[in-house]
Amino acid sequence: MRIWAVGGGKGGTGKSLVTNGLGTRLAERGFKVILVDTDFGGPNQHTYCGIRKPATSLVQFFETRTPLEEITLKTKHEGLYLIPGNFNSQNTDNLTTTQKQKLFRHLRKLQADHVILDLGAGTQYDTLDTFLLADVQVCVIAPDALAIENFYLFLKNLKFRQLNNTLSALSLRERAKDIWKNRAEHEITTGEQFARHLRGLFPQFAELYDAEQRRLRIDLVLNQVREFRQTEIGPSVSSAATKFFQITTAYAGHVRFEKDLWQRLGQEAPVIHQGSSFSLRQDLEKITENVLATRTSENG
C-alpha cells in the first residue's frame, strides 16, 4: 500500500481536483483507493466526490477514537472511497507529533492499494510533516507568479522542517542551535552550508538526513493551463526546484483549464466522471501514469 500526499503551498491551485483525479484514475485501473481530506481549515473533497453532507469525518477519529474503517464512505466511483475532513472541530488545527504518527499508523492498516491525502494550503508544520511522511509526494501549482513563489516557499520550509525533524530525532537540536548562533565563526551563510557542517560533525546526522532526503521526491503537476505556451512553466519550475533546493522534482504533466468545471460542484454526482470533458480525463490519466511509472522505476 502507498500513501500519497498532494500539497504545494498556495490555496486555489486545484489540489483537491488533482487529488480526486488521481484517485479516480487509480480506481479505474482496478485499485482500491481511499481519499483522505486532511485540509482541516476547509475540507471540500466530499464535494468533488458528489457527497453533500458526509455522515462521518476525521473528527470522530481524533475525538472519539472511532476506527478509520468506520468513517470511510463509499463514493459513486467503483473502488473509490473517502474519509471526509473535519467539521465543526476545534481540536485538530494543530496536531501533535504523536497524533500525526498515530494517524499514519492507522492509515497504513487500511485495506487499500492507495491512500491519497488532500492537504491544506500553506506551510504549517502539520502540512509539512504529513507531506514528508508520505510515500508519494505530489505538488500542484498554477501558471502564475504567486503560485510559483508560494511553491518555492513551500520547498524552503519543507527543507527546514526536514532538517529540524532529523535533529530532533537524534536529540541534536540544542547543539545545532548553538552552531547556528555562532555561524559566522564557521563561515556558514546558507541552510545548505549549515547542513553540510552538521554532516561533518555528526555521522549519525549525516546518515539519517541523507536517507530522508533520498525519500523526498516530488512529482509536480501544473494545473489551470489556459494557453499552450504555459505548459513550458512546469518543466522550468521542476528543474529550478531540483537545482536550487536539491529536491528531486519530476514534472508529471499539466491539466488544462476547464471553465465549466464549477457548474458540476455541489451536484450529487462526482465532479470527475464519465461525462467529464475529454481533455480533463486525458490530462489526469497521463499524470497518473507518469507518477506510477516514476515510482515503479524507483522500486525496480
Image (cartoon, rainbow, N blue to C red):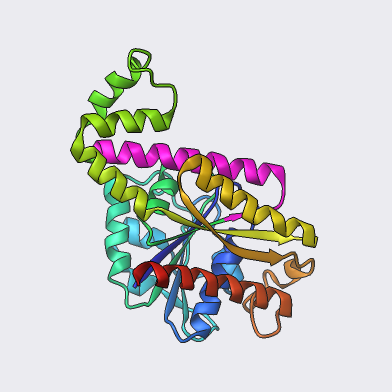
Front one among 44 and 240:
240
Q: Position of residue 149 (x, y in %)?
A: 63, 40
Q: Can you say which quadrant of the picture contains the N terminus? A: bottom left
Front one among 99 and 239:
239
Residue at left offset 78%, top offset 69%: 260
Q: Of helix, strand and loop, which mostly describes the magenta segment?
A: helix
Q: Position of residue 137 (x, y in %)?
A: 45, 58
Residue at left offset 44%, top offset 22%: 189
In the picture, measured across the screen, residue 181 lies left or right of residue 17, that is left
Does 86 sit above or below residue 207? below
Among the 4 quarters of the image, the one containing residue 229:
bottom right
Does 135 sit above or below residue 31? above
Within the magenta stretch, is there residue 63?
no
Is residue 213 in sight in this rendering? yes
Residue at left offset 42%, top offset 53%: 131
Within the magenta stretch, is there residue 142?
yes
Q: Position of residue 115 (x, y in %)?
A: 41, 69
In the picture, measured across the screen, residue 51 lies left or right of residue 266, that is left
Q: Position of residue 205 (x, y in %)?
A: 23, 38
Residue at left offset 50%, top offset 43%: 155
Does 229 sit above or below residue 267? above
Does 194 sit above or below residue 60? above
Front one among 16 and 57:
16
Is residue 90 in sight in this rendering? no
In the picture, measured across the screen, residue 12 lies left or right of residue 104, that is right
Q: Can you say which quadrant of the picture contains the C terminus? A: bottom left
Residue span colored magenta = 140-168
